[in-house]
Image: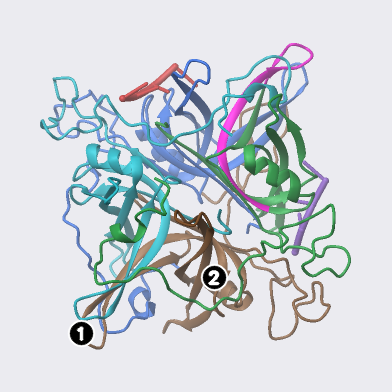
Chain colours: A green, B cyan, C blue, D brown, E red, F purple
Amino acid sequence: MARGVNKVILIGNLGQDPDTRYTPNGNAVVNLNLATDESYKDRQTGQLVPKTEWHRVVMFGKIAEVAGQYLRKGSKVYIEGKLQTRKWQNKEGQDVYTTEVVVDINGQMQMLDSRGGDGGGASQGAPAGRPQQSGAAPAQNQAPQQQPSQGSMPEPIDDFDDDIPF
Amino acid sequence: MARGVNKVILIGNLGQDPDTRYTPNGNAVVNLNLATDESYKDRQTGQLVPKTEWHRVVMFGKIAEVAGQYLRKGSKVYIEGKLQTRKWQNKEGQDVYTTEVVVDINGQMQMLDSRGGDGGGASQGAPAGRPQQSGAAPAQNQAPQQQPSQGSMPEPIDDFDDDIPF
Amino acid sequence: MARGVNKVILIGNLGQDPDTRYTPNGNAVVNLNLATDESYKDRQTGQLVPKTEWHRVVMFGKIAEVAGQYLRKGSKVYIEGKLQTRKWQNKEGQDVYTTEVVVDINGQMQMLDSRGGDGGGASQGAPAGRPQQSGAAPAQNQAPQQQPSQGSMPEPIDDFDDDIPF
Amino acid sequence: MARGVNKVILIGNLGQDPDTRYTPNGNAVVNLNLATDESYKDRQTGQLVPKTEWHRVVMFGKIAEVAGQYLRKGSKVYIEGKLQTRKWQNKEGQDVYTTEVVVDINGQMQMLDSRGGDGGGASQGAPAGRPQQSGAAPAQNQAPQQQPSQGSMPEPIDDFDDDIPF
DNA sequence: TTTT
DNA sequence: TTTT
């Protein structure tokens, strides 16, 4: 239900722990402060100057719950959402506009930290109270393979059939 | 349910009418041939050389139905999907690999043609039986939402509440 | 020179003609107001409610020149840029933050209107001195082809060689 | 120089060390095998079934050099490129099509591994012979910039002025 | 303020 | 306010 495209893709680090709240209905809403870094060459000095851009990210639903549970200050994360600007009034009664990256059911989130052992020696045992992508650790070092389909018919139809959530 | 990101974004024109098929279950599967144009400067001649890249796109579900109904040869379209390579055997029994852009429930499609005279005075003559983005145009992708918001509180929480299909 | 990813992709329509300015050095800077449309189902009424999001887009360099010359109020356009928030003071001396989509040399712009009367019988009245993607009209209706490379070697190296601007 | 959009965004892990070659002109060309993981719910069993998609990635120029130097089997990486299909003949003289994700000067690459200590205790001292994102880490993509900006004027024009390589 |  |  969109007559346009409104997409934001970010990879950055959290400036602080996620701020988790709940709607009256118990739905999670998480706010993140996400930093994306860039650097540019100063025209005068020829020096590389670092530049950080801060993004306000708002997550809803299941993604919010996961984010609230696993992300922490410093976490690196991939975010896909949409731009949204809210208008509100400050205490002086003036209009203020805030632009946020909204990650809802159509968005995506990927935690990019190498999991685990950030404190003791726990190489994959996620420390209590701060589980980070524990068991779900990414499939690394797999040998390239190419599995699924076969049969002499190039048509894709038969392959997918019904595991696909139409 | 992804431990990675696999995203393709294309804007191009159809090389031919969509090829619509149906699974035994009655689900639509549409194949498109999509051309994206680019040009580069030839190093020898300094000339701008046009280069067309052709993409095989496979769509499923509701998006496929809309595509099959409204898209035609020459239609300009925005596509968001994922890369998938299928392996099959040709008649000689040799392995063949085909890479496609799969647009499923997580993908998106936007028709970019200026609509075709769907009223009467067809401005560029959309022939009958060849509807181009007529008025009935398609609800492409469901998207949760949040109410516009206002009031003197900057927190986004109250606004969304419960129109969001968590 | 980026240690993160900061990418925005929009397809929408201009709310007004582009605002073109120039730096003291003669570089074009163009501001656009871009609307992206979406609709959502109201939870109470079950009705589809349209929702428009407005984006402030700032373009630089060559892209800005093209945008200023060819885009007009109502133009449909594809934009790729990055998020940037500027802080400034209003007349009351208060800090104000403005978030913009910056389209610079790393960004992209694609005009998506079916070109305007490039012959004479302007179908929607492209005023003189207001060329809209005229001759450059997109290659439509081409038959799918698959040209460039050949030779029995699968390695990509030989093909590109030196037309590629390394 | 594009009359369309052809963009691929991937986050995945290398199935093997990068394959680095050089053109006669000494330009680096690197081939990667990149795995993106996904899982879907099997319709019969209700089980989550993991599914890995393998992508052939070809990089050119400076990005290729960085990739060849710092990426290794298992490395997690963000890739932005474009789809390209090459046609070649196998030893039997038959046409074969290979689709690749091409990362050239317009593309982007981001290494996503937490640096270092992959063997001994070196937390950031990259072990000899297997440098991973050492301090020297790569200037991946040149990006124009704008100075932070301030002052009481909301217009972006004055800020950028001339560090931008128009 | 655009578009459908 | 993060990260390198």
Give the chain of mark 2: D
Residue B37 in view: no
> What crowding class fits label 1: few (fewer than 14 Cα within 10 Å), some (14-19), or many (20 or more)?
few
Indicate yes or no whether the magenta region holds residue D133.
no
Residue occupying image coordinates x 62% and y 25%: B160
Residue B48 found in image quarter: bottom left
How many numbered marks have been drawn onto this rendered protein structure? 2
Q: Which residue is mark 1?
A: D93
Give the chain of mark 1: D
Quarter occupied by the N terminus of chain C: bottom right
Residue occupying image coordinates x 62% and y 19%: B149
Residue occupying image coordinates x 53% and y 31%: B144
Q: Are marks 2 and 1 on the same chain?
A: yes
Q: Which residue is mark 2?
A: D62
Q: In the image, A125: left or right of B61?
A: right
Name the outermost residue toward the bottom: D91
**Front residue (pair C88, A146):** A146
Indicate yes or no whether the magenta region holds residue A89.
yes
Range of magenta residues: A77-96
**Front residue (pair B131, C33):** B131
Residue A2 drawn at (x, y percent): 42, 32
Residue A62 drawn at (x, y percent): 63, 41
Q: In the image, A74: left or right of D102?
A: right
Residue D46 drawn at (x, y percent): 51, 54
Residue D110 in view: yes
Q: At label 2, which amino acid type do we have?
A: Lys
Is C160 situated above or below C82? below
Is A153 situated above or below B12? below
Q: At label 1, which amino acid type do we have?
A: Gly
